[in-house]
Amino acid sequence: MSLSQKNFYRLAQEKLDQNQVVEAIKLLEEGLSQGYDHKLAMLLCKLYLDTEEVDQAYSLIKEETDLFSDKKVYQLYLLILKHAHFYIEWLQIKALSGKLPDIAVEPVGEQEQLNIMNQFKQARNVTLGMYQDLFKLNLTNFVSFTQSLLLDPTLEFATRLTLLEDLVKLKLTPKTSVRVLDKIEVFIPAETELLRKSPIYREVVYGIGDRYRNRPNELPYILGLVNLFIGALYPKIPEYITNTASFTKNLLSYIETGNGYEDQEILTKINQFLPK
């Protein structure tokens, strides 16, 4: 915490002593505008909850790099999920830890769940807030709704990938269908790695990093394209990429020159399905 941030924190505490919560929030927000600080953020999260600014509390606590090691942070995180009714994210924590979190979270009522799904389906452009509202569904509705979306050929690329990874985080064991390029594929979320933990993905990224080590300014752009190409194959990456070294070389060639050599056909097909 910088000296300036310490002053903001002290002034905020003084405002709280005077029951001036709104003024304290403004001071803490000003302090955080200078850079993230754990102490400022945790106090501000609590005040957001006190004033029913749950969305802001959720966004802020997600800036923490570790939500689980510090018990106070973890408890606050669960409390925010409870107020937000983010039941699906709570189930993901349960699946990750293998035990029941000690703060219960409930989904919203059935009618509100129907409203959330209808709004999502009718939206031309899905916002972050609309996507997060899906966490308020019960498990049955979330899984069935997600399944219907994953079979929709018009589903937006980023939404597709996020939905898939949310199913993986739930460690669901039933088979799930998903459209990969122009085919309907089946996968088991509990047996699937998150994209960035996929061994093939990591090998490809490592190979590209090595190739561009002398051109670091170009690397973010290239990695962004690589994420799109490999993400289009998720969660069936091993079925499409059997030789990682060869695919990496051919993918870079395709990006740079349009020539994908042995992988020309699959790379051209992937390119047709990428967001333009």
Image (cartoon, rainbow, N blue to C red):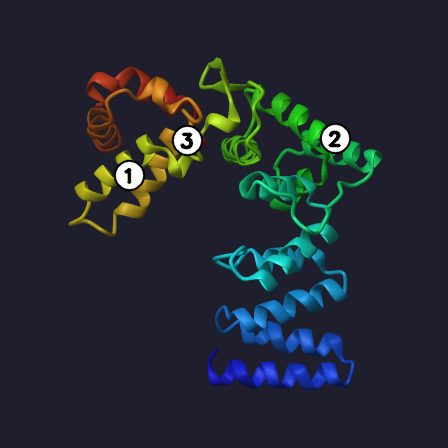
Residue 130 sits in quarter: top right
Q: How many marks?
A: 3
The residue located at (56%, 35%) in the rendering is 166
> Alpha-carbon distance for marks 2 and 3?
27 Å
Could you tell which of marks 1 and 2 lies nearer the N-terminus?
Answer: 2
Residue assigned mark 3: 231
- Local secondary structure at mark 1: helix
Relative to the observer, which residue lies in front, 84 or 182?
A: 84
Residue assigned mark 2: 118
Residue assigned mark 1: 205
Mark nearer the viewer, 1 or 2: 1
Which percent across, then down, holds residue 258?
A: 24, 26
Relative to the observer, which residue lies in front, 100 or 140?
A: 100
* Above-or-below relation of 261 to 202: above
Residue type marked 3: Gly
- Local secondary structure at mark 2: helix
The residue located at (36%, 41%) in the rendering is 224
Mark nearer the viewer, 2 or 3: 3
